[in-house]
Structure formats: structure tokens, C-alpha cells
Amino acid sequence: PPPSPSTYERHCTSCHPSPPPSPSTTSLSIALSSIYTGDQPDRASSSWSTAFNFITSRQAVQPPNFRHTWLHFLKHRNAAAFTSIQAGLLRAISLAHASQGPSCDPTPFWWLFLHLELLLLHPTSSNNRDGESIQSTIAARIASFQDGHIEELWTSATAIVSSPTSTSPPTPGPTNKAIQHSADSDNWRTAYNRACSNQQKATISTSNEGLIHDLYVPPYAPIHPTNQPTTPHPTPQQHN
């Protein structure tokens, strides 16, 4: 059975205590200690200060113009770095909430945590990344994120737009994948029109009649046959 609320609270208090409040803590100092991993904090302080100002002006955002990210390409060192950034952001959120300083706000860290996949794993074509590999591109974005270049990553992510609906569909093969291809390319109008259009009825002829009959399994024998033969009951004998 799950633990009672009081047991859970005692566990959190003893094993996961909240950091002590520190009025001198600022959002910038939290970012430099929890997210930044370099050895030039003075240079990073300027970029992170700019990042906080940018996030404040971008709290009301619109959904991205793409459906899929590079999450399935996240492997090895990039995966470890991505997880480390997530943990750092969660620590920053905890520190910001615990701090009572006037210059400490957890909102930017929440914003970064919720937009992390968008900023680091937005898809781009090889032409837009100078032929670099996907792994190299992700690694460069992780470094930019840790240095506080959030606006650059946001600009790169929002520059991606769906393919125009005028894009000609692929030539249908044995299996028509034109509908799914349009959906994968974020051509919603084209995918909708193809999915909802009247499909041509299949023609049944002697060439495929056998295949149609093979789709049906032989019928099972009835559980209670209607013409089941009846067994006559023996006539009771009379005794004198």
C-alpha cells in the first residue's frame, strides 16, 4: 500500500530537506552554480542576465511549428548532458523557491525546464546547419544553453516552419503513404484533405475473388443444432 501523507512528509523532511533560505541568493547566482559549467563566470554572467530579460518578455508563447523533435537522436554524451541540465534546472527551481531574496525568481527556471526540448532538440535540415551532424549540432546547442545564449536558441527553434501545402505528394507505391507523409511533414491541410476525400471502391473480379473468400474462416458447428436426433426414452414396464 502507498505510504500515508504524514509518512511521506517525514521522509521528505529527513531525506530531501529544502535548502535554507538565503536572502542574498539571486537568479543569476543560481544559474551560474546549477547550469553553467564553464570556467569564465564573468562572461557567462552577462549572457545569463540577458537571457533572464528575454525570458521575461517571452512568457506567453505559441506552440512550435513542428511536431517532432530530435529526442530519438539523443544518445551517449548528449543524453547525459541533457539529463544533467534537467537536474540542474530542478535544483535551480528548488533553490529559487526556497530563497527569500528580492532578486530571485523561479519563473525563468520553470520556463527553461518546460522549453528545454524545444530549445535543444528542434529539428533542422543539413542545409541549415552547414552540414554538421545531428549529434554535433545537439552538443553545440547544449553548450550554448549552459552559457546562457537562450535567445539564439529560441530564434533558431522558431525559425522552423512547416513545409508549404503546395508540396507535391510522393508517388503512391503498393501502399499509399501520401496521407502519413503529409502529416509527418506537418502539412495538416493536405493530410486532412487526403484522409477525408472519397476513396475509389475496390473492384471485385475473378482475379481476386479467391482472395476475398480466403478472408472468411469456415463457420463453426452450432452449439445447439436444430436437427439434432432425439433418443426415444424407454417405456416403463408394468408389474402385476
Image: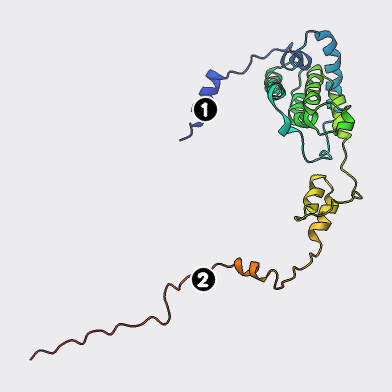
**Outermost residue to the bottom:** 240
203 left or right of 20 in image: right
79 left or right of 195 in image: left
Residue occupying image coordinates x 77% and y 11%: 38
User: How far, Cα to Cα, is label 1 from label 2?
Assistant: 59 Å
Residue flagged by tag 1: what amino acid is it? Answer: Tyr
Q: Circle 2 sits on which residue? A: 219
Residue occupying image coordinates x 85% and y 34%: 125
**Residue 102 appearing in the image:** no
Residue occupying image coordinates x 58% and y 68%: 216
Residue flagged by tag 2: what amino acid is it? Answer: Pro
Q: Position of residue 89 (x, y in %)?
A: 71, 22
**Residue 228 location, quadrant:** bottom left
Viewport quadrant of the N terminus:
top left
Q: Position of residue 167 (x, y in %)?
A: 90, 48
* Front one among 51 and 136: 136
Q: Position of residue 72 (x, y in %)?
A: 71, 34
Helix, strand or loop under label 2: loop
**Residue 21 appearing in the image:** yes
- Residue 8 is marked as 1
- Mark positioned earlier in the residue sequence (1 or 2): 1
**Residue 49 location, quadrant:** top right
**Residue 17 location, quadrant:** top right
- Residue 170 is marked as none
Residue occupying image coordinates x 86% and y 22%: 53
Q: Position of residue 134 (x, y in %)?
A: 79, 28
